[in-house]
Image (spheres, rainbow, N blue to C red):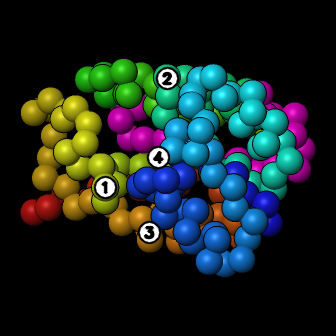
């Protein structure tokens, strides 16, 4: 399978890149670290995605994740997985607004994709604690983080059970 992952040099993107490479897939990554600066490279990423079997829509740059969903809907052989967030439920940062827009765009365009699309709504991932603006005290909790392996296992499950179009991975609150 030919796979394209944006944001492939750190965090979840890197974990997915390594996983699918180890399985022997043809995996391509497009990130700032290898010369693909968003939003300038948008059309290059779009063109590359159109040649792939699976596009992991992982980069977070303003509303570009939403734009990829809109612009790739006519690629009938392309599967697309978008990394969303439970932050879409909140309003404490631009990140929340971008993830809410991604989620809305996903559901608006889902009829075009059928079983070729998946939205991952995730909570705090294993590398994200402390990297971004903390939520306000009314939202913040003491969470167990979500390991990348759990997400990778969910993606693998989806690849063989594609009637699923939304996987929500919320954090377990420590008691």
Callout 2 environment at 10 Å: few (<14), some (14 to 19), or many (20+)?
some
Between residue 61 and residue 174, name the one nearer to us: 61
Q: Secondary structure at mark 2?
A: loop
Quadrant where the image shows the N terminus? bottom right
In three-dimensional space, the C-alpha distance between marks 1 and 2, rounded to whole angstroms, equals 21 Å
Q: Earlier in the sequence, mark 3 or mark 1?
A: 1
Q: Which residue is mark 3?
A: 150
**Magenta stretch, residue numbers:** 71-89
The mark nearer the N terminus, 2 or 4, is 2
Residue at 86% across / 47% down in the picture? 51
Q: Is residue 34 left or right of residue 123?
A: right
Name the N-terminal-most of marks 4 and 1: 4
Image quadrant where residue 102 sits: top right
Residue denoted by label 2 = 62
Q: Mark 3 or mark 2, which is nearer to you? A: 2
Nearer the N terminus, badge 3 or badge 4?
4
Mark 4 or 1: in front is 1
Q: Is residue 90 above or below residue 129?
A: above
Q: Is residue 140 left or right of residue 94?
A: left
Gap in angstroms between the C-alphas marked 3 and 2: 26 Å
Residue identified by numbered label 4:
121
Where residue 37 appears, x then y in whole percent? 56, 31
Residue at position x 70%, y 66% in the image: 159
Whether the magenta-drawn stretch holds residue 86 is answered as: yes
- Per the image, the residue denoted by label 1 is 127
Marks 3 and 4, Cα distance to the nearest angstrom? 13 Å
Residue at 35% of width from left, 49% of height from top?
A: 123
Q: Nearer the viewer, residue 65 or 86?
A: 65
Give me the residue at 23% from left, 49% from top. Answer: 129
């Amino acid at each position: 399978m030919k796979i394209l992952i944006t944001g492939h040099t750190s965090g979840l993107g890197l974990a997915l890149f390594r996983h699918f490479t180890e399985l022997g897939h043809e995996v391509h990554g497009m990130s700032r670290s290898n010369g693909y600066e968003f939003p300038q490279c948008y059309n290059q990423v779009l063109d590359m995605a159109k040649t792939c079997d699976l596009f992991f829509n992982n980069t977070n740059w303003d509303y570009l994740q939403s734009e990829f969903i809109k612009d790739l809907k006519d690629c009938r052989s392309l599967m697309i997985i978008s990394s969303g967030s439970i932050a879409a439920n909140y309003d404490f940062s631009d990140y929340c607004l971008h993830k809410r827009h991604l989620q809305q765009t996903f559901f608006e365009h889902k009829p075009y994709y059928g079983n070729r699309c998946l939205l991952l709504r995730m909570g705090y991932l294993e590398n994200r604690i402390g990297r971004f603006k903390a939520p306000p005290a009314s939202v913040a909790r003491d969470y167990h983080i979500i390991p990348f392996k759990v997400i990778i296992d969910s993606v693998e499950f989806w690849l063989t059970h594609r009637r699923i179009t939304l996987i929500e991975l919320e954090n377990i609150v420590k008691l």
